[in-house]
Amino acid sequence: MRIVIDHAQVPPRTELVDPEDFSAFSVRISVPHHTWVDRDVLVELAGEVVDRAWLDRLDGMIAYAERHGWVDDSGRVRAHLEVATEATAQTDSDAG
């Protein structure tokens, strides 16, 4: 039996696959390769590091993304999704 969670659907779809198979159990999560992030969210999450120089660099990054078609009509920036396993999450928290 397997629970399948599809985050590519809006809202995410969850279903139970092979409900009669009691010999195995897993959860599969499908995620899209990209998501869209609003500039204001980045500024809010950056918190105390935000100053004029930081904002200029952020705007430069967004301008670069826009030249490559990675900014939508709402001004949100396309971001790659990285799925973290427990080991990856531990490494990330150690680095911070």
Image (cartoon, rainbow, N blue to C red):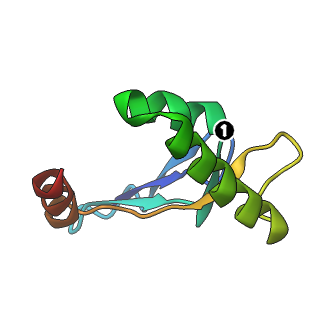
**Would you say 74 lies left or right of 2 here?**
right
Quarter holding the N terminus is bottom left
Front residue of this view, candidates 85 and 28: 85
Q: Which residue is mark 1?
A: 38
Q: Secondary structure at mark 1?
A: loop
Front residue of this view, candidates 46 and 35: 46
Seen as rendered, the residue at the extreme right is 73
What is the number of callouts on the image?
1
Q: Position of residue 37 (x, y in %)?
A: 63, 44
**Would you say 48 lies left or right of 69 here?**
left
Residue 95 position by quadrant: bottom left
> How many neighbours does mark 1 have within 10 angstroms: few (below 14), some (14-19), or many (20 or more)?
some
What residue lies at 62% left-to-right and 31% top-to-bottom? 40
What residue lies at 58% left-to-right and 41% top-to-bottom? 55
Q: Position of residue 64 (x, y in %)?
A: 72, 66
Q: Position of residue 25 (x, y in %)?
A: 25, 61
What residue lies at 58% left-to-right and 67% top-to-bottom? 33
**Would you say 42 lies left or right of 82 here?**
right
What residue lies at 23% left-to-right and 67% top-to-bottom? 24
Front residue of this view, candidates 2 and 34: 34
Residue type indicated by callout 1? Asp
Seen as rendered, the residue at the extreme front is 53
Q: Is residue 16 above or below residue 44?
A: below
**Would you say 65 lies left or right of 21 here?**
right
